[in-house]
Image (tube, coloured by chain):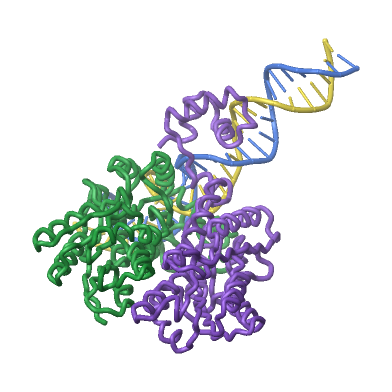
Chain colours: A purple, B green, C blue, D yellow
DNA sequence: TGAGTTGATGCAACCGGTTGCACAACCGGT
DNA sequence: ACCGGTTGTGCAACCGGTTGCATCAACTCA
């Protein structure tokens, strides 16, 4: 592996000049840069991040922490964050960890010591645990808010309210809300919005859960949904909706017909029936926004904006 | 932040002794260790990984590379690998990247320069691209094999063969195989196994695809499946199966009845109908095995075992 | 008792970049 | 011709550990 010194020797300059040519071109004469560039190319030189990090006192790593990867919901968020991270020369490492247990917190504290900043996506667990991590390194929250921390959340509460109201307008008198994982920060807000919308439009709302955001949870929720005699269901996550949909149909229940299940556009359109509400979160935007916030947080700690991204509600066409 | 030198000064020893006391206790007198330990605790000393890495010439990072995170299939694999990595003090960073394009390869080559080893999960793209990465750092393949590289694959080909034969035995004369993403290494093997099983048991096999492993692909595959007039379908991935199932039922097609779709146990059981084949891959085991292989590959390059993990086939009960 | 081990610790040279400071060459202005 | 101000480059001291080699005391065995 070629080092700075090798390049310097070949190009006939000092290490320091080479370093500057490669990282701060504005400090170096154009033709010098060209020569150094040529030498670097010839040797196939690549910067040794570790050395660079040691010298600069930064690691060039950011961590994206998710509670689980089972939920495809995080995929586009990670994608968006990763794209932005790459642009600013950061590596984004994805880690699965929980803030619910002391062991999980300890693991994250260790991780925090090794990165320049963290994005905690939909972290569950008490505020103090979140604060403990945020105390170590600049931290941005996704789909959760906390005082004193920058955050970006998809405003699904409003979307759920819209959906419930829309359902009521379309004649649904009994609506079931399937809550998300216990500890979910978003869940109470969504539930409240659902309740409020139901009350305002004179529909009855039954609340069920908590359910993890998995297919299996949707399957096991079926009995409760049927018991509730609701004609429309608003589940917390797409995976839950899928499990529910398939099981309902497996039991010969008309969907929609006797029961209508909201999901996201790709799913509702697949149902081949119009008038099913879909809630679509732009995960990529969430991820990009989170990374941007982290970028500023790493430069100017203390700065903490709370972003709320709008969420789209559409009603399926056939 | 306290450094080695601080601890050394406080404890009255040399940096080097402190370093050894902390990382190779067997080389240092017990009471010395005790004193150094005390000093370290008092100062709240924590090892600076970056410095350690620079000196040792290793990064303590391993990369887990997936073609996409949309597919929940990778979640348990990553989980398993991450668990094992943590045990051996490695950080596992998850990266989304493709080996199909030159740009993707370049990005991975850059990544490879920064880690101690990589696990490429279900990489698509030509062998030379894989080889290019493997030439840089110890590399383990998951769900793909290549000469000279350690790999671990889930033997889904055999499972697909079993399923097709089972379907034929149960009276299905026309079976549709929905191929996976173009470039998938597993796909040809599965297709071959399906063909062979069909031929052996006198059933007719129609092959469709390629399809990406997504819900949307399952939706769009519906027309072709119906056209094929097959009574049973074996899709490449669970997400495809879900899209297909939902759309079929959305169109009023009896599933099963007119068409039967295989998936994984959680899904087939949700259908509430017996006799549907499920193919279940133990992702956690795949991940753990991959990480173990990487561990040995990092110590002893050249060593390259090819593991084939059995895959379970079950037929749903009501 | 002396030569040969063994064990514990110190010394100093790394690992590969980054950066403050010094210095020389060159600028336009007076 | 002289001066303050740029601009471009080199020098060397870092960043914080790791490790080969030297040193020295204590210990073994003849």
Q: Please determine whether, in this image, residue B180 is positioned above or below residue A191.
A: above
| Near-viewer residue (B213 or A317) | A317
For this view, does B230 lie left or right of residue D13? Answer: left
| Near-viewer residue (B284 or B9) | B284
Q: Quadrant of the C terminus of chain B?
A: bottom left
| Near-viewer residue (A99 or B28) | A99
Q: Quadrant of the N terminus of chain B?
A: bottom right
Can the viewer see residue B12? no
For this view, does A297 lie left or right of residue A255? Answer: right
Q: How many marks?
A: 0
Q: Position of residue B93 (x, y in %)?
A: 43, 56
Q: Position of residue B259 (x, y in %)?
A: 26, 68
Q: Position of residue A311 (x, y in %)?
A: 59, 64
Residue at left 68%, top 70%? Answer: A147
Q: Position of residue A157 (x, y in %)?
A: 61, 72
Residue at left 32%, top 67%? Answer: B284
Can the viewer see residue B316? yes
Q: Please determine whether, in this image, residue A181 is positioned above or below residue B207.
A: below
Residue at left 21%, top 70%? Answer: B313
For this view, does A42 lie left or right of residue B207? Answer: right
């Amino acid at each position: 592996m070629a080092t700075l010194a090798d390049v310097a020797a070949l190009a006939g300059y000092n290490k320091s000049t080479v370093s500057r040519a490669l990282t701060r071109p504005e400090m170096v004469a154009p033709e010098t840069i060209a020569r150094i560039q040529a030498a670097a190319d010839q040797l196939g030189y690549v910067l040794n991040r570790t050395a660079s990090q040691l010298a600069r006192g930064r690691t060039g790593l950011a961590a994206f922490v998710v509670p689980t990867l089972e939920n495809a919901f995080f995929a586009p968020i990670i994608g968006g964050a990763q794209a932005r991270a790459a642009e600013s020369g950061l590596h984004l490492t994805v880690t699965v960890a929980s803030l619910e247990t002391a062991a999980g917190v300890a693991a994250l504290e260790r991780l925090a010591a090794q990165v320049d900043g963290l994005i905690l996506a939909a972290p569950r667990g008490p505020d103090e645990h979140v604060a403990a991590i945020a105390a170590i390194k600049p931290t941005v929250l996704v789909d959760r808010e906390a005082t004193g921390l920058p955050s970006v959340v998809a405003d699904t509460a409003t979307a759920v309210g819209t959906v419930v109201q829309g359902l009521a307008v379309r004649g649904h008198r009994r609506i079931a809300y399937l809550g998300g994982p216990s500890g979910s920060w978003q869940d109470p807000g969504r539930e409240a919005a659902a309740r409020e919308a139901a009350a305002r439009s004179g529909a009855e709302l039954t609340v069920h859960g908590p359910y993890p955001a998995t297919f299996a949870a949707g399957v096991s929720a079926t009995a409760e949904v049927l018991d509730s005699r609701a004609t429309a269901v608003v589940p917390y996550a797409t995976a839950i909706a899928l499990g529910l949909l398939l099981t309902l149909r497996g039991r010969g229940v008309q969907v929609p017909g006797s029961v209508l299940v909201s999901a996201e556009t790709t799913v509702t359109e697949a149902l081949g029936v119009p008038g099913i509400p879909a809630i679509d979160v732009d995960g990529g935007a969430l991820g990009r926004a989170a990374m941007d916030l982290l970028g500023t947080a790493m430069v100017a700690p203390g700065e903490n904006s709370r972003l709320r991204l709008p969420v789209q509600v559409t009603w399926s066409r056939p």
